[in-house]
Image (spheres, helix red, strand yellow):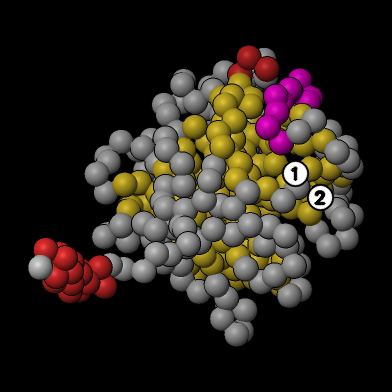
Amino acid sequence: MYRLRFLLSCTFFTLCIYPILAQKPPKTTSKKSGNPVFPGWYADPEAVIFKKQYWIYPTYSAPYNQQVFFDAFSSPDLTNWTKHSHILDSTAVKWAKRAMWAPAIVEKGGKYFLFFGANDIHDDKKETGGIGVAVADNPAGPFRDYLGKPLVGQIHNGAQPIDQFVFKDKDGQYYLIYGGWGHCNIARLKDDFTGFLPFPDGTTYREITPKNYVEGPIMFVRNGTYYFMWSEGGWTGPDYSVAYATSSSPFGPFERVGKILQQDPTVARGAGHHSVIQVPGTDEWYIIYHRRPLTETDGNHRETCIDRMYFDEKGAIKPVKITVDGVEARRLN
């Protein structure tokens, strides 16, 4: 009798609890990066791929007198990030005193060249600063000053020497694309990155400013088309955003197509100053950018985020939906 009661009790318990167990959601192996992708106030992210690792080089977002160093972050899969602290700071760049920002990086000849803006100069006759170059033997640094002076220390064509991007064209030529104050220049870099080569017409800095350009230029090529992207609006405001243009040449002419990244009042404000990465050998694209949380009013409280970027059948960039979830894990082959 005792055994029968025990068996009946077990059966009743199983029948009662089965519906509860059955309602549990299935386990998933999917993991997303979440946004922001790493903690801390970071802006102007430069994303690249080095040796099957994703890297992000952002601005440390703080008041200019505190903004005197760079951290970097690496990941094997876009979801797990390792911080590399102080890969470069003003102690290694004697002419840089404040406002170090918007790094750009390329690997060439086994060396890693980090381009950066410093000092936020407004008058090149009275101030030292502009765009510098640092070099290291690996992407985590430590970086050291490469030239001992700015690479671009003057204001050309009305462009403040900030927000640099290094573009490698299909023929192997490297270009520096940069500029604030609503003007953008392109210049041909020497092979050793110590200076510039003049264009055939004798000029060194060629202006390629599209309509509504403010700052933060980048360029890439897809299916033979040059995509030129930049930030619009004010960097401390909700109207900060990203637009783009296309051309058959890195020199334009670039006709503005429209905005593809901007705030979502339900997610975050001021989405802008971005970079783009393509998974090698695929048509998978990601946009890495900064934005301001809805809870923040301090202009420097910006965080680095990542979302997918898609093209339509005609090659136009589709508007990016900014998310809280971020992107799926993606390892490199």
- Front tag of 2 and 1: 1
Q: Is residue 145 above or below residue 31?
A: above
Instruction: Name which residue lies at 43% across and 64% down.
Output: 28
Instruction: Name which residue lies at 62% across and 68% down.
Output: 284
Q: Decide if residue 319 is on the left or right side of residue 178.
A: left
Residue 51 seen in render: yes
Residue 169: where, in percent of width, then height?
80, 59
Q: Quadrant of the C terminus?
A: bottom right
Q: Which mark is residue 174?
A: 2
Circles 2 and 1: CB atoms closer than 8 Å: yes
**Which is nearer the eye, 28 or 95?**
28
Q: Decide if residue 277 is on the left or right side of residue 3.
A: right
Q: Which mark is residue 106?
A: 1
Q: Secondary structure at mark 2?
A: strand
Q: Secondary structure at mark 1?
A: strand
Q: Is residue 144 magenta?
A: yes
Q: Decide if residue 168 is on the left or right side of residue 157.
A: right
Q: Is residue 121 magenta?
A: no
Residue 216: where, in percent of width, then height?
56, 49
Q: Quadrant of the N terminus?
A: bottom left
The CA span between labels 2 and 1 is 10 Å
Q: Amino acid at mark 2?
A: Tyr
What is the span of residues highlighted in magenta in the rendered image? Answer: 139-149
Residue 203 seen in render: no
